[in-house]
Image (spheres, helix red, strand yellow):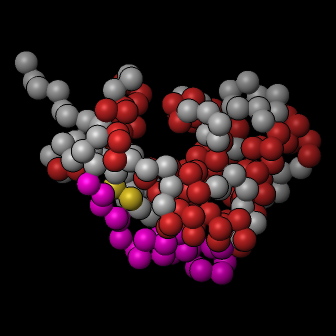
Amino acid sequence: MAKEKIRCSWCMKDDLYKAYHDNEWGTPLHDDQQLFELLCLEGAQAGLSWYTVLSKRENYRRAFDNFDAVKMSKYTPAKIAKLLLDAGIIRNRLKVNAFVNNAKAYLAIQKEYGSFDRYIWQFVGGKPIVNSISGMQDIVAKTALSDAMSKDLLKKGFKFVGSTICYAFMQASGMVNDHANDCWKKKGK
């Protein structure tokens, strides 16, 4: 019988969480559209669990044109009203409006910096910060870097990008490696 890989304790809920952990969380992400999607979904998480959002991710992709920021930036009040009737997503008016708003801000950043990736990774100097994580007690909710990212994103017009959301985004996008020290993803095996 094959031995189960050692994983971070937070992902042991079910196969959806394990697959997310194994294939995505903490892996450096540099694709603009995927970074934008992740930032939107992290914002949707505000006040909820990441598992709630993750389990609805495919519905979000369908509802929001696969996070095509150009299309999203042109959503009309009628389109937003239709989205608020979609039971497959979290039907919070502020969060749905934030997605549309953030699409416009994201496009402005792409124009200014050449790519969202170039802009967002500057907060960690372009390479992942690797933290020593012995257990859940070692994981923080925010840092000075996530504070700086949040402040700058807010200044650039983003919504639902508080420091805690930014830190979760940094972890998920691999800007920060907070895998447990004994996790196979930290060890690369």
Residue at (50, 66) in percent of width and height: 144
Furthest residue in direction top, as rendered? 1
Residue 182 or 87: which is nearer the viewer? 182
- In the image, residue 166 sits, relative to residue 18, either above or below, namely below
* Residue 34 percent coordinates (x, y): 52, 54
- In the image, residue 163 sits, relative to residue 56, either above or below, namely below
Residue at (69, 31) in percent of width and height: 89
> Is 120 in the magenta?
yes
Task: Answer yes or no: is residue 31 visible.
Answer: no
Residue at (41, 76) in percent of width and height: 125
* Residue 1 percent coordinates (x, y): 7, 18
Q: In terms of image quadrants, where is residue 124?
A: bottom left
Point out the stretch of residues depicted in magenta: 109-132
Give the left or right position of residue 154, taking residue 82 as reference: left
Residue 157 or 27: which is nearer the viewer? 157
> Is 103 in the magenta?
no
